[in-house]
Image: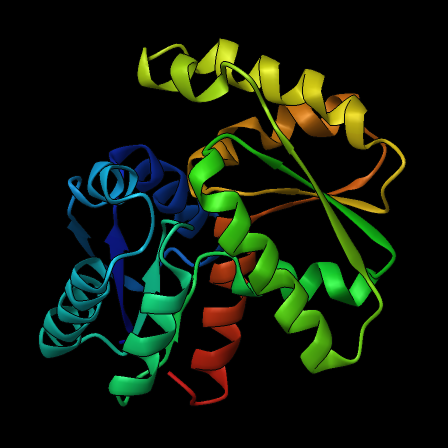
Amino acid sequence: MTRIGLIHAVQAAMQPVEDAFKSLWPEVRRANLLDDSLAPDREAAGGLSPELSRRIVSLASYVADTGADAILFTCSAFGEAIEAAARALPIPVLKPNEAMFEAALDIGGRIGMLATFEPAVTSMEEEFRDLARQRGSTATLETFVVPGARAALAAGDLTEHNRLIADASSALAHCSAILLAHFSMAPAEHAVSATSTRVIFSAPKSAIAKLKSGSKSGRC
């Protein structure tokens, strides 16, 4: 049976991806690895330092050694390091937003992205633009960072977290689709869908759909 290794930098990302697996691919084996020092260390370093990049590659190598058929990172702030891990390992290594960006580019036009962790936004926007160039797409990305949502989640107030994100979706009403930037934002998908007529993408569902498709085709 396929085994997916999940590498987390924040505990808040773990339940959303587990819920998505239960809904979309319940039979697959999951193995979780959490290093909750990664996000604060990145903030303290002011970016993705060489040391942090080495740690990301080391974590991926460890998970590969446990027998994973593919690896999914769930934190969106380590894109370049995850790409390095993908080059170093013989199994698929998926960035958190890779599949979601691909799905959004299939729609095209002006894509909106709601985010709650501002330090990750620049690298995510660069990732989107790079992927658009690779695909020859003219799609563009507009990001809105939701004030107070991350603090609400940290305080354990999921209802307020979801409400703030749903309310903020009106700022992207002119876009053809809305992306929920982080795995930890996935619980807000229903609330956003209730207030927006746009197509809503969450990173966990998009990533799992891609992994499942790869499993069926023998790519993981």
Residue drawn at x 45%, y 70% as measured from the top left: 211
**Quarter occupied by residue 11:** top left
Quarter of image, res 178: top right
Q: Give the percent coordinates (x, y) of residue 151.
A: 39, 15
Q: How is the image coloured?
A: rainbow
Furthest residue toward front: 46
Q: Nearer the viewer, residue 202 or 143?
A: 143
Asked whether, in this view, residue 68 is left or right of residue 198, the answer is: left
Q: Above or below — where is 33 with respect to 56?
A: above
Q: Quadrant of the N terminus?
A: bottom left
Vertical position of residue 178 compared to residue 207: above or below: above
How many numbered discs, if any? 0
Residue occupying the point 82% across, 61% down? 107
Q: Residue at x 26, y 41 (%)?
A: 39
Q: Position of residue 199 (x, y in %)?
A: 78, 44
Residue 182's place in the image compared with 104, above or below, is above
Front residue of 52/93: it is 52
Side of 7 where 144 appears, left or right: right
Quadrant where the C terminus sits is bottom left
Q: Position of residue 5 (x, y in %)?
A: 24, 64
Instruction: Tell me where residue 219 sits by quadrant.
Output: bottom left
Residue 128 percent coordinates (x, y): 63, 62
In the rendered image, the vertical position of residue 218 relative to residue 150, given as above or below: below
| Residue ID at (72%, 30%) | 193
